[in-house]
Amino acid sequence: MIWAGLWKLEIKENLKLSYKIWQLYMMCCYAILSIGLSGNVVYVYLRDPARIIEAIGIAMSDYICLLKMLLCALRKTTQLLQTAVQDDEIVSSEDPTLNQLLCRHKKSVNMIGLFIVTYSFAFCVHMSFYGGLVQYRNYQMKFPNATEKPEYILSLWLPFNVQNHFDLALFLQCFLLLQGCAGSFASLGFTNAMISYAVIKLKMLKYYFRNFDKFPQEIHSKDPVHRNRMAIRNLENLIRKHQFIIRFIKDLNESMSIILLIEYSLSSLMLASIISQIMNSGDIAFAIYESDWYNYDSKVGKLIFMIVMRARRELTLNIGPFGPITLEAAKARMQVAYSYLSVISGNNRNN
């Protein structure tokens, strides 16, 4: 999000001015890119109507990216990011088992983040360079004596005569598209980070409940009254953690429902595989049931019962007005996409 110019949290004092300049630069790039793509729609409509669908599709991709960036920069989503960044509990733990869990989770999150950046950057490089430089080179080899430049290669409208300055126009297109892909990095990375944070908090909570006689304070006393008092204190502390996660996911749902609608339309299966781990929060009930709860009196049993009842209610993230994200929903969308491709392929073979 720093690269995209969308970082709203604190940064080092000596970097504030540099970041303000960088932020202004990125905003100018986004504005020029959006104006160029929008102008290209009008230009294509007037000069070459056969390419209007292509021009609208490219412009819509830019608008969707800008919308996701705007949603990521809202105050409420920034507060969620600040909550995750300032949570020291997910950094490390003195408990060896929990520390291993955190290390594995960090590796998986870093791998997913690296994949998102690599894939997005490679896609943008392919679109900008292959769609521009390579095609232009092929055009020159095919038509070495051509006097006109292939304007169909350009996806941007630029306020000068591109026939006279075609190399400059091609360079600006490649440069602005690469800068614009930073917004895609930011929105995808933010979505992945927030969902991954909720997942690791749920995994940690399951471990705490499974060993509630050790967290946050280990129970050593052999006095039944004191043991029960400490058990209740530990359970109350874990209940507060559970309530914090519930509130966080509710706020996340409110802030990201539109983002998730957009992202899910583009990558439903990938998101569903991650979010399904949140929907398995009911495993907390099994975790607490596997603890030594039967060694305590009825007050502890009542708290255990309350925890089990609340944990059995699913935590969900909604796709706008279309209901919760599930693997079944992702599968259905993949089947629809496959059916559509099958019909199109069949029609092409028949033709």
Image (cartoon, helix red, strand yellow):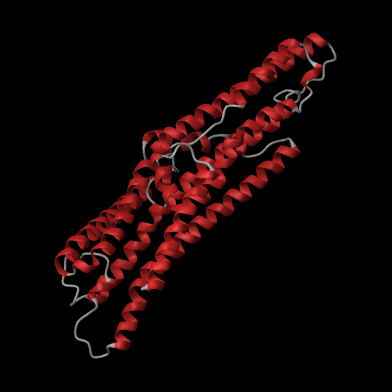
User: In the image, what residue occupies the spot 78% across and 15% down?
Assistant: 296
Where is the C terminus found, in terms of image quarters?
bottom left
Give above or below for 84 relative to 289. below
Spot the residue most to the bottom. Answer: 145
User: In the image, what residue occupies the spot 53% across and 45% down?
Assistant: 272
Q: Position of residue 325 (x, y in %)?
A: 49, 40
Residue 89 visible at all: no
| 197 relative position to 233: left or right | left
Give above or below for 53 relative to 258. below
User: In the image, what residue occupies the spot 61% across and 27% down?
Assistant: 312
Q: Position of residue 149 (x, y in %)?
A: 22, 79
Spot the residue most to the top. Answer: 225
Q: Position of residue 47 (x, y in %)?
A: 15, 69
| 92 relative position to 22: left or right | right
| 91 relative position to 59: left or right | right
Quadrant housing residue 132: bottom left
User: In the image, what residue occupies the spot 52% across and 50% down?
Assistant: 269
Instruction: Report how many numbered discs are placed on residues in the image.
Output: 0
Q: Nearer the viewer, residue 127 or 347?
A: 347
Q: Nearer the viewer, residue 74 or 325?
A: 325
Spot the residue most to the left. Answer: 46
Q: Nearer the viewer, residue 313 or 199?
A: 313
